Amino acid sequence: MKLTKEQFQKDFKDRLHHKFSIETCDANSVELFQSLGSLIKTYISGDWREDRLEQQRNQQKIAFYFSIEFLPGKMLKSNLLNLGILDLVRDGLEELGLDFEQIAEAEKDMALGNGGLGRLASCFMDSLASTGLPGFGNGIRYKYGLFKQEFIDGYQVELPDAWLTTGNIWEVRKDHEKVDVCFEGHVWLKEDKQTGRLIPVYENPRILRAVPYDTAMVGFRNEQVNNLRLWDIEIPESEERKYYSINERRQIQDITGVLYPDDSTYEGRRLRLIQEYFFTSAGLQTIVKRFKKLNLPIETIHEKIAVHINDTHPSLAVAEFMRILVDEEGMEWSQAWLATVRTMSYTNHTIMSEALEKWPVDMVKQLIPRVYQIIEEIDHRFVTEMSTKFDGDLVERTRILRDGQVHMAHLAIIGSHSTNGVAKIHSDLLKDVVLHDFYVLYPERFNNKTNGIALRRWSQISNEPLSQVLDETIGESWRSDAEKIELLMAYKDDKNVQEKLAQAKKLNKQRLADYIFKTTGVKVSTNAIFDVQVKRLHAYKRQQLKLLHIMKLYLDLKQNPELEIPPRVFIFGAKAAPSYYYAKAVIKVINEVANLINNDKKIQDKLKVVFLPNYNVSLAEIIVPAADVSEQISLASKEASGTSNMKLMLNGAITVATLDGANIEIKDAVGEENIVIFGMDKDRVYQYYREQNYNAYEVYNSDLTLKRVLNTFVDGTIPNIVREGQELFDALIKYNDEYFTLADFHSYIEAQEKIDLLYQDKAKWNKMSLINTANGGRFSSDHTVKRYAEDIWGIVAMK
Ligand code: KOT
């Protein structure tokens, strides 16, 4: 956008005066941030409005991305960068005597997601706008985002994330676009005398109001502004008398209260299902309304609209769309079904069976009776049609209603034209194993779309030192075209460039070291290897394997204090689900290991262990640029893709990885000599499953080193962990190590020894690091969304 520094400074001061009636010197950073944010929103609003109008004028096909999570993090810098005024604003504010970084710091990290799935949704929002593609996000405006994590006595404590208390400067309430969503009651079908059609009649429904809050998704220097729509819940005036007590009202408000309510109890699960239907129905109702304004035949709706189902949480979209088309728009079932299948597409993000959603039939029937009838009809027609072509058992296994449950993935696959996985290996596993039955039915529907990351955030915004070296070395084209980073390959043997990159890394490590000291009081040296594992805490991601490595080094050093190893700082960032006791035990053990090692003089600072609390997007922006080693050590076959692996390699970290998720594609991109692979591959894992002959105790008992290391969890070596140490020990021995941690132990230790050797050869290390950065461009989510646009959604760029 065109803007001079002087104009900006004037606008900013005016905005501060209007909003708070104060002078810049009196404002605190929250007030300064809010003034700045609201000004930026004004700058955006012209293009935002214009793009919406243009989409309507051109009758452009739009992709609606339905996701129960969005994890954008802070948006100020990203918006400024994309508008092309980041430097101008920074300079302008500094000239006014204001500290830009401090102002940016005041923004709340918008954390309406748990991890990978939500972050991917936000990377896609950025990339859709930046590639000029008409994309529109649809989700929930949770009052409380993902809990804030603190450690007390080494234990995870969860605090509420009341991110909305000082207001959300980026959002706009669109009161005129509110819609009603109908729950509960009874439905019966009445025959329309004239047409003979069956019309649903609702008795005593509970009507809730969905109010949209929109946030601009600004494209990178292309004047494209898309929309992220998050729905809040309200009680419609007409219904107010029905709620007698404050408690009852609060229960309604709770529907959009928290992200992922605890789903280990019936009530918690029910609330989750309400959330799913609430935002899905609200989103679809608006979409159909919007389409009708185009005055086109309703049966062509799929030509103008694509609806993407981001994992199964919004998969009621299939049935709800049918309800709208059949009940409200009067379409014939078969025609409506054709339009639905053509409109919908679905991404699977995990093969973990406990995450595959199933709802008890009784719950669905009671909560959304009409939608349930439609699901029954879809199921019935599916069984009837498929039974003529396929074996009865296969049809029974793939139907939607089975064992008294509604199988959401089945609904999503049957009701859409595309099912994709998020990395090659994951998509293959879906076809060959997890969803094989469906692959037999619909081979043409299955495809792969390897994940990507919003490259600008993970380089230009979070790693300015690296960005500067790239500018000096290969020019600035990489800033708008990620694949151009590959130009760096021409300098892979250039000592000067390698050295500059190493210097940039050093600066980032210093920034992280300062942060570590500030938050934990632990002093770390930037000469040490910064060894990073950042992701949700889960047994399949195997933070426990990292722990075994740390304890082995500790024991080695205790036995031989003169042992020469390059110093390492182990850096963890991870939240555990509040009800996931094993994961919480791992956190406690890591924290106690940190206490033990960091305070042991004999270790001579050769090892440090740091668990940074409250890992989120903003913290990732500090950790990722500073990493030397990226730990991607999930059991092969279990991590659908992973995306921190991409962020870390782009930032020059060397990956230690199993052949899992997108690690395999990273290996293919950088070459085997520039990544350290270890452990079993997926075929070996599946062989164990087939032969059922994995015996963790035997592995433990036949390996003295491993035995010695594992015993530290229960023999008092690590203080204050009696219960938690036993829990980890039991998971690995008594319960036979579900994720084959012990089987991969030796190979993992070898991989880490290789890292030690490589790190000591500075020239080699720097070259490897350069090659990783140079090949990071192909993991840009710009590329990924283009593939979705072409292969799945059928949308084209506006700009
Ligand atoms: C959570 C609940 C149900 C179904 C799926 C999930 C889920 C999967 N949440 N996050 N994921 C991750 O999604 C990322 C983006 O595709 C992947 O990179 C990662 O491997 C998944 O674990």
Image: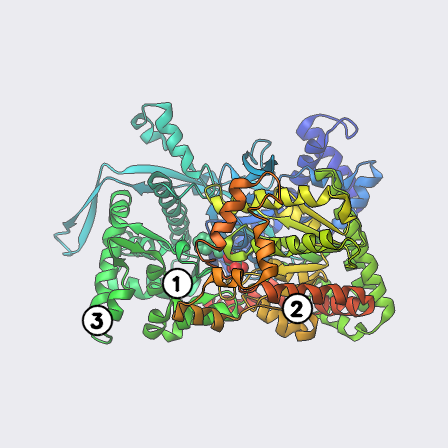
> Is residue 525 rendered to the left or right of residue 51?
right
- Residue 467: percent from left, percent from top: 77, 59
- Residue 129: percent from left, percent from top: 59, 57
- Amino acid on which the number 1 mark rests in the picture: Thr
Residue at the spot of label 1: 343
- Amino acid on which the number 3 mark rests in the picture: Gly
Please state which of the two labelled residues, at mark 2 or mark 1, is closer to the viewer: 2
> Is residue 238 rendered to the left or right of residue 623?
left
Q: Which label sits on residue 676?
A: 2
Q: Does dot 2 land on a helix, a strand or a loop?
A: strand
- Marks 3 and 1: CB-CB under 8 Å? no
Residue 576 visible, this angle: no
How far, Cα to Cα, is label 3 from label 1? Answer: 29 Å
- Marks 3 and 2: CB-CB under 8 Å? no
Q: How many marks can you see? A: 3
How far, Cα to Cα, is label 3 from label 2? Answer: 47 Å
- Quadrant hosting residue 470: bottom right
